[in-house]
Amino acid sequence: MAKVTMTTTVNTQTGAPINTFSIGVNDTIKSVVLRTKMCAGAYMYTQEGLSLTIADGSQATATIPGSAPTPIAGKGATMTVESSTIDATTYIEGIDFTLSAKTITFTTPYTGTGKTTTITYDYYDTDVANLNYDVSVYPSNTKGVITMDGLNLIVWNEGILAQEVKAWVDAGTANGVVQAVITDA
């Protein structure tokens, strides 16, 4: 028997923990280890006051100055823009502009003089060590999912439907309630 623990990462768009595992093809999953407490998700933070000045005239792109900011990911960024010819207006990521690393690309060139921009965005803490496992798990309410090769195997408190599953691929994912799988390896 071998215990295969989960490797956890954080989905930058939703904050959900993502658990992956690797096993041998044809290993049999004999049982699962369920957590006594799980994490509902990563903490979300709001970045405010990321400010930049954009050159006068018509600009199709701009670069966020300084060191790379915390990754701009999550529910989408908003940008307050104003210049001598534009009253304070809110631009929305995906509609009025796109972001790629530190580069802002405007859908319609940003034209004016004395332009200032403030960016606000939400992001999730992607440091797995900061996940807080504080949601109680009880045998009577436990349902998890293991996914292998795109197929979902339902995990109840009795194990994977109280059956053994022979792995047909060498990797999978599991939701937050599954801490480890036990194989025959």
Image: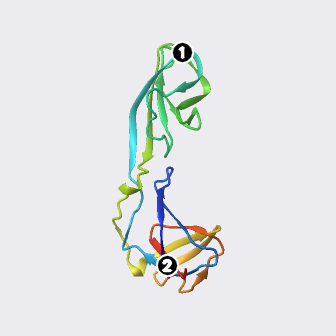
Q: Residue at x 50, y 44 (%)?
A: 73
Disc 2 vs disc 1: which is toward the camera? 2
Answer whether residue 172 is visible to the viewer in this image: yes
Rounded to the nearest angstrom, the CA distance separating label 2 from label 1 is 65 Å
Residue 12 location in percent, x, y? 49, 50
Q: Residue at x 39, y 42 (%)?
A: 46
Find disc 1 in the rendering and name its residue: 112
Vertical order, 10 against 68 (above or below): below
Question: Is 151 or 129 nearer to us in this picture?
Answer: 129
Q: Is residue 35 left or right of residue 11?
A: left
Residue 99 location in percent, x, y? 55, 35
Label of residue 2 in the image: 2
Q: Tell me the quadrant of the picture where the C terminus can be found.
A: bottom right
Q: Using the rendered view, name the quadrant where residue 157 is placed.
A: bottom left
Task: Look at label 1 and name its amino acid.
Answer: Gly
Residue 1 location in percent, x, y? 50, 82
Q: Residue at x 35, y 64 (%)?
A: 133
Please tell me whether mark 1 sits on a helix, a strand or a loop: strand
Vertical order, 143 against 107 (above or below): below
Q: Residue at x 53, y 13 (%)?
A: 56
